[in-house]
Image (spheres, rainbow, N blue to C red):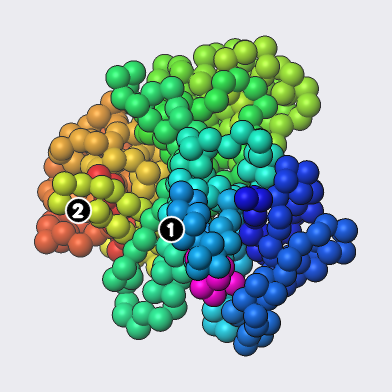
Amino acid sequence: MKKRAYISVFDKTGIVEFANRLIKAGYEIVSTGGTYDLLAQNGIKATESADITGFRELIGGKVKSLHPKIFAGILADLKERESLMKDEIEPYDLVCVNLYPFENYKDKDVEIETLIKNIDIGGVALLRAGAKNYENITVISDIKDYDIDLENIDIKTREKLAVKAFSLTSKYDCMISNELSKRFSAEDGLNEHKCFNFNKIKDLRYGENPHQTAALYNYNKVIDYEFLNGKEFSYNNIIDATAALNIAAEFYDVNAAVIIKHTNPCGAALGKTLKEAWEKALDCDPLSAFGGIVAFTGKIDLEIAKMLTAMFLEVVIAPDFTDDAVEELKKKKNLRVVKLNTPLSEYLKFTEEEIRLTPFGALLQEKDSKELDPETFKTVTKEKPTQEMIEDMVFAFKIAKHLKSNAIVIAKDLRTLGLCGGQTSRVGAVEIALKRVCDSAKGAILASDGFFPAIDNIEVAAQERIAGIIQPGGSIKDPEVIKAADKFGLVMVTTGIRHFRH
């Protein structure tokens, strides 16, 4: 019995070449609509699906392949050839399908009619039928698989391709469910139904520790980046690089440098130049910067590159590098040099939600992306902030947002002086952050991710001659805290925004 292939593709890239390979391998081809026309235009013999089903495309092409004579052939068990012949069922050996590009329209301001039009029905059914019958059918759902060895398709290959097809249809339905849920839901907050679909990008050497296996998956879309030097990312590199970029993106339109160790910033600064920003960031805690991950908001030149190669770093990531800077950085063969092609302004919008899996269930929350507007600050003390103090307050509060609670940031001249996060006591975090200040804290700003539950925090800050404090406010002890600030002549502003991070 001659081998048969059913082809119905929206994206016709490479399909002519693949069809030619099928013909040479002894396949007969059955095809639909536009795919059939394209094959015919290129001299490839094929049978149009309508000649088998007995009807042309219906309702504007919405129905082409949904017919028993098509699906019976795809679902047929080739071991029952006599029964198939009796029922006049001609089985297929291969199905090649790709789907309407729904992903091109989700998350965009398009009319609902356009969105619905790009929901594939027949293609999904064909893929599922072919994948279900993997013992008999080879199902091709990815253009990358057009180079398959048609002469040597074994059961393991068909199994792998079947899983790939089911994963594609699962992801496709997931996208549709999420988008329509978002559009049709009249309720505030997160959707009642939320679907995630993970596709493996690659295996990683190990996870946080060598005894843990790990892999990187694509669940929606990923940023565009490229390696200019060094090994691929490790699990911890990805976590730390994300932490570094999260902070850098807060300052995407100015010169900024960030140094990360174990997801925590150990130095961050803004500068008139990128070099100045780096020098100020490094000065915060040069000891902890050893083996760090650094991110920049601008183009790395040779001068900065030489500063970076003068120390041990794991990752350097920036929007761009000069050619001579890349050559300098390549002197450190294990240094991962990463060019971020996605603009940092867009990076901010890449993930709108955060998810954590717990034994209690999956926790999902909106990303902590509330804008910090100095116009909404409330000055609660007698002393008022200067413009320079306000700028430092905005800078410090943005950094505090990315530290684990309880988080305290000491900053001055748009650079961090001392940082502390992850403490169980807020006054303890204040004390540790102040102890880490290399220079005097006189005239500096203290930012807190949460309110102050007692006046001891203010007393410690005043002893180190802190000039101003920025905090969310909202404690029942606010009157006492403000009174203490006034007593020591401190400036205090409240934001009404809390940045707990667990």
Residue at 67% from the left image edge and 19% from the top image edge: 329
Label 2 element class:
strand
Q: SS of the residue at dot 1?
A: helix
Q: Is residue 323 above or below residue 5?
A: above
Of 453 and 349, nearer the camera is 349
- Give the number of the mark in front: 1 or 2: 1
Q: Which amino acid lies under the numbered mark 1 shown in the image of this protein?
A: Ser
Question: In this rendering, would 65 be left or right of 442?
Answer: right
Q: Quadrant of residue 288?
A: top left
Q: Is residue 95 visible?
A: yes
> Residue 445's spot in the image, x, y percent?
37, 43
The C terminus sits in image quarter: top left
Taking the spot 87% from the left edge, 64% from the top edge, the residue there is 41
Residue sitting at 35 percent across and 83 percent down?
186
Alpha carbon distance from label 1 to label 2? 21 Å
For disc 2, the marked residue is 361
The answer to whether marks 1 and 2 mark residues whose Cβ atoms lie closer than 8 Å is: no
* For residue 34, side relative to residue 70 (left or right): right
**Span colored in magenta:** 65-73
